[in-house]
Image: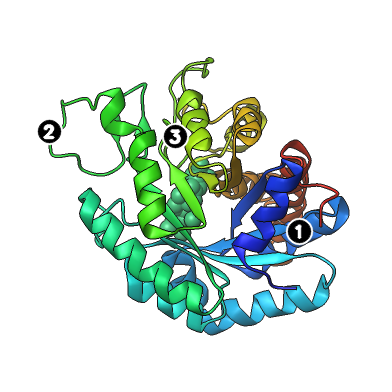
């Protein structure tokens, strides 16, 4: 059944587990994720970005997810708008049957310029008021995704290319988080703790203080019933980098978020863990492998099948590691 993020994560909080939120753009990603969920008996968060909605088309996405709900009828599924940039994006998602929306008011609608706190509170409150009226959950974001290693936020920061952001300029402020959630009434809060989107998160293997897990703990103490969300949570596995590069790929050595750090977060209120890059890499590594090893191959299914199998394995591993397995 299709359920809201609030329903899905309230159970995760009761049982102290986390749920990976995997991005979908097409049928193959959807099916691979659902197969892994079925095998491990895990609840599922499917999320679609604005890019996914324009790639697949809203009607196609909606119908594909309906088909998944029908095919895997015993698995609880939440369909979530990832990084809604303005209220209109969230409202049209709701029209297409999404049961959860992220209003990312940490950035202006162009998704490049950091927004003011007041803008964030206002735009997020507006979405929450409307979404809650129709039983849809809302995720907000406070803080600036970006790396403590480089001091660079993901958005243009106005301090110039050479300017490093300090720790307290990047990370979510726990007292402000309390005020933000009280005023906006969001169900889930995305926190900035030193992660960033994409494959290139860290240039060195992360250590115990690469991420600000202390900030997660401080926010969870203040907001015990708000579900915390970690964006940029791909682990960028070394084995997948190696596979990608073995077959002609050129991905420079990089490190992602260690699964053990996410597991620490789950002990302290992290319930939704956003993963897209790992899924992309799992599939792309196998496209390369087939193209490299079978030069005469031209049936797309023979590229997609091994790619789906690798994505399925990755998703199953994350369901197990985050404790979602067995909780459908
Ligand atoms: O946060 C970004 C997600 O990985 C989705 O990426 O906007 O390219 O679909 P996208
Ligand atoms: P990754 O790029 O680490 O997979 O993060 C995805 C994400 O946060 C989507 O919102
Ligand atoms: Na999101
Ligand atoms: Zn994100």
What residue is disc 1 on? 305
From where the camera sits, is residue 115 visible? no
Crowdedness of circle 1 by 10 Å Cα count: few (<14), some, many (20+)? some
> Callout 2: helix, strand or loop?
loop
Colour scheme of this structure image? rainbow
Q: In this view, does 72 lie above or below 209?
A: below
Of 26 and 153, which appears nearest the observer? 153
**Which quarter of the rendering shows the C terminus?**
bottom right
Of 316 and 89, which appears nearest the observer? 89
Q: Where is residue 147 in the image (x, y as percent from the top left)?
A: 37, 29
Q: Quadrant of ligand 1?
A: bottom left
> Residue 314's mark?
none
Q: Alpha carbon of mark 2 to alpha carbon of mark 3: how far?
A: 21 Å
**Residue 116 in the figure: left or right of residue 129:** left
**Residue 94 in the figure: left or right of residue 282:** left
> Callout 1: helix, strand or loop?
helix
Q: Where is residue 306 in the image (x, y as percent from the top left)?
A: 75, 52
Of 54 and 221, which appears nearest the observer? 221
From where the camera sits, is residue 192 visible? yes
Q: Where is residue 120 in the image (x, y as percent from the top left)?
A: 28, 56
Q: Where is residue 87 in the image (x, y as percent from the top left)?
A: 34, 71
Which callout, 2 or 3, points at the residue further toward the start of the chain? 2
Which callout, 1 or 2, points at the residue further toward the start of the chain? 2
Q: Alpha carbon of mark 3 to alpha carbon of mark 1: how far?
A: 31 Å
> Residue 160's mark?
2
What residue is disc 3 on? 195
């Amino acid at each position: 059944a299709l359920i809201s993020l609030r329903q899905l994560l309230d159970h995760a909080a009761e049982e102290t587990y986390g749920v990976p939120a995997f991005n979908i753009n097409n049928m193959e990603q959807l099916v691979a994720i659902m197969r892994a969920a079925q095998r491990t008996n895990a609840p599922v968060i499917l999320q679609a970005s604005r890019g996914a909605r324009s790639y697949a088309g809203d009607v196609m996405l909606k119908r594909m997810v309906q088909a998944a709900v029908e095919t895997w009828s015993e698995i609880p599924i939440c369909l979530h708008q990832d990084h809604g940039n303005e209220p209109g994006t969230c409202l049209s998602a709701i029209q297409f049957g999404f049961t959860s929306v992220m209003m990312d008011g940490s950035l202006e609608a162009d998704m490049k310029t950091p927004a003011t706190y007041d803008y964030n509170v206002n735009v997020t409150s507006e979405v929450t008021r409307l979404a809650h009226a129709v039983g849809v959950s809302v995720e907000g974001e406070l803080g600036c995704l970006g790396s403590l290693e480089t001091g660079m936020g993901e958005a243009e920061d106005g301090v110039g290319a050479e300017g490093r952001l300090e720790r307290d300029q990047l990370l979510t402020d726990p007292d402000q988080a309390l005020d933000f959630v009280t005023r906006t009434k969001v169900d889930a809060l995305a926190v900035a703790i030193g992660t960033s989107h994409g494959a290139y998160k860290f240039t060195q293997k992360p250590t115990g203080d690469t991420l600000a897990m202390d900030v997660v703990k401080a926010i969870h103490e203040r907001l015990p019933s708000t579900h915390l969300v970690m964006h940029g949570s791909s682990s960028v596995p070394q084995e997948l980098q190696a596979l990608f590069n073995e077959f002609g790929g050129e991905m420079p050595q990089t490190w992602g978020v260690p699964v053990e750090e996410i597991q620490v977060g789950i002990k302290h209120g992290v319930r939704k863990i956003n993963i897209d890059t790992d899924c992309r890499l799992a599939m792309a590594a196998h496209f390369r492998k087939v193209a490299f090893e079978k030069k005469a191959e031209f049936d797309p299914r023979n590229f997609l099948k091994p790619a789906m199998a690798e994505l399925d394995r990755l998703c199953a591993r994350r369901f197990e590691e985050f404790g979602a397995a067995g909780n459908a």
